Amino acid sequence: MAEILRQESAAILRGESTAILRLDGITKRFGPVLANDGIGFALAEGEVLALLGENGAGKTTLMNILFGHYVADEGTVHVAGQELPPGQPGAALAAGVGMVHQHFTLAENLTVLDNVALGTRPLFSLSSGRRAARARLRQLSEDFGLAVDPSARVADLSVGERQRVEILKALYRDARVLILDEPTAVLTPQEVDALFATIRKAVAKGLAVVFISHKLGEVMAVADRVVILRRGAKVAEMRTAETDRHRLAEAMVGAEIVPPEVPPATPGEVLFRLDQVSVAGSPGLRDASLALRAGTITGIAGVSGNGQRALADLLSGLAFPESGAVELKGSALADWSPRQAVAQGIARIPEDRHATGTIADFDLTENAMLEDYARPPMSRKGWLDWGRARKRAEAIIEGYDVRCPGPSVPIRLLSGGNMQKLILGRVLEAGPAIILANQPTRGLDIGAVTYVHRQLLAARERGAAVLLISEDLDELRALSDVIHAIHDGELSPAFARGEITVKELGLWMAGQGGRHAA
C-alpha cells in the first residue's frame, strides 16, 4: 500500500493527476543546516492532510516557503496548476492560500467585521461596501457553522470565537487551501468538536486543509492523509485509515515511543497554600484556594487568559495577593519577590520559552545560569565563575539530551524542544522543592513531550510539589494527581485522578461546572 501511495503522489507531482496544491522537491539550507531536503507532496480539493514532525523537522520552514516568506534553494510550489513566484506572500494569498496561526493575528480594538474585511479594500474606502461585507460575512458564518457577531469587538471575544474570526478571514478571501497551525492548542474539548465540525463542512464544499498538530488523536480523527517529516526530509506518507497513533509516533521520531508509567503518588506536607486569595489583573485571581503537596502534581486546566498568568506570577514572586492568605512551607508570606522565590527553592518553567524563559542572543552557558548568576557558587564577591557556569551548561546538555553544537552557541539557534530541555535542566538540576511547570510541552513533538513528562514525574518521586498549568487535557489527566479547572480567575474544587471526565472538565473550563459543586 505504501508503494501505491508513492505512485499516486508521484503522479500528482508529475501533473498526471489534479491537485489544488503541489510542492515539488523543496530544498532549503540555512548555512550548513539543511532545513528542507527535497520535500514533495500534493493536496487535493476536499481533503485534509496532516503535516507531522518533530520540533525542528522542517514544517515551519516549508510553510514559510509556501507563503513566500522564504525562498527555496530548489523546488517549486504550484496552486491550482499555477507556479507561485518565490518570495511573494501576496501571490500566495491571491492564489487562495490562507493560514490560521497558532497565535492569532487580530486587531483587538476593531470589530469582527473590520478584522475580516481589513486589507480586502483600499484603505480610504473602508467605510464603503460595509453592508455587502456584513451580508457576506453572515453567509459564511451560516455556511460553515462559525457563529460570531460581526459587530463584536475582538477584545471581548473568547479564544474559540477569535479562532472562528481567523478562519472567516481566510474564507472571506476565497481561500482554496487553508493551513491550520496547532489549531486546538487553546480550545476546550467542546470547542475542538465545533472546529472539527467546521473542517468537515469546509472540505465537503471543496476546501483543501493542511492540519499541523502534535496531537495524534486529533490527526487520526480529522485527517485523510498524513505526511511526516524528520530532520528536514519526508520519511512517510500514508492514509490515516491504514495506520494508527503508535505508528505515526514511531515514524515521527524514528524509534518507539513508550509513555512513562505514573505510579500512585505519596503526598507529603503542604509546601504552598492559597486560602481565598485574590490577585489584581484581568482576570487575575478571585478567592482562589489551592494546596501544593510534596510528592504530588497538581494540574490547572483552563482556556488561555483565565487567570493562569496571575497564578503563575503569584507562585514565582511576580505578584502579591490583594486579599486572602498565602503560606509557604507553613509560614505566612509577609513580603514576596522573584529573588525570594528562587531562594526558597521555587523553580519556574515559564509559559513562553522565547519571551521569558531565555534570552535569544545569550549562549547556552549564559542561559543556563540566568536565575542564579548573582548567588554562590556562580558568583563570588561580584565575579562570575565562567568555568563553573560552562561545566553546568555542559552537564545539562549531556544529561537532558540538548541537541546543539555546544554551550557557546546562541540559544536562538536551537529548536523549541531543545530550548525547553535546557530550561528543564536549569530548573531541575538544583533539586527544587516546588516546581511551576507552565505550559511545559506547548508546541513540542511527542518525543520531547514524553521526555518532559518523565522529568516531571521523576521530580515528583523525589518529593517535589509540581504545579502543572497546561491547556493539553490529555497531559493534565495523564500526569496530575489532583486537577483544578480555572475560569475567569476562579478555581474549581480539586478533583482526584480519574474523578472527572474530559467533557466535565471542559464544562468547568467554560464556567458551567457550578461554582459550589462538590
Image: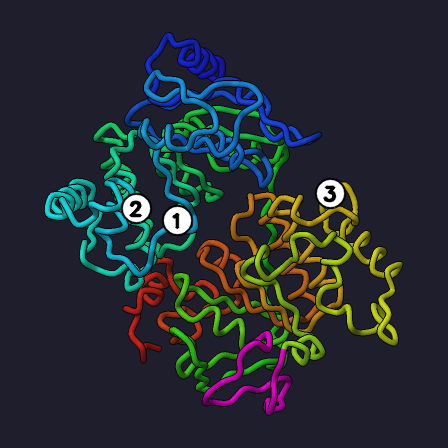
**Residue displayed at 34% across by 16% down:** 81
The residue singled out by tag 2 in the image is 195
- Front label number (2 vs 3): 3
Circles 1 and 2 in contact, beta carbons < 8 Å: yes
Quadrant of the frame with the C terminus: bottom left
The image shows residue 221 at horizontal and vertical percentages of 36, 39
Please tell me whether residue 490 is drawn above or below residue 361 in the rendered image: below
The image shows residue 183 at horizontal and vertical percentages of 39, 46
- Front label number (1 vs 3): 3
* Of residues 311 and 110, the one drawn nearer to the viewer in this rendering: 110
- Which range of residues does the magenta coloring cover? 315-337
Tell me: 308 left or right of 267. Answer: left
Mark 3: give few (<14), some (14-19) or many (20+) Cα within 10 Å: some
Q: What kind of secondary structure does the magenta stretch mostly adopt?
A: loop
The residue singled out by tag 1 in the image is 184
Spatial separation of the CA atoms under disc 1 and disc 3: 30 Å
The residue singled out by tag 3 in the image is 404
For badge 1, the amino acid type reads Thr
The image shows residue 271 at horizontal and vertical percentages of 62, 80
Q: Secondary structure at mark 3?
A: loop
Please tell me whether residue 178 is drawn above or below residue 366 in the rendered image: above
Please tell me whether residue 330 is drawn above or below residue 494 in the rendered image: below
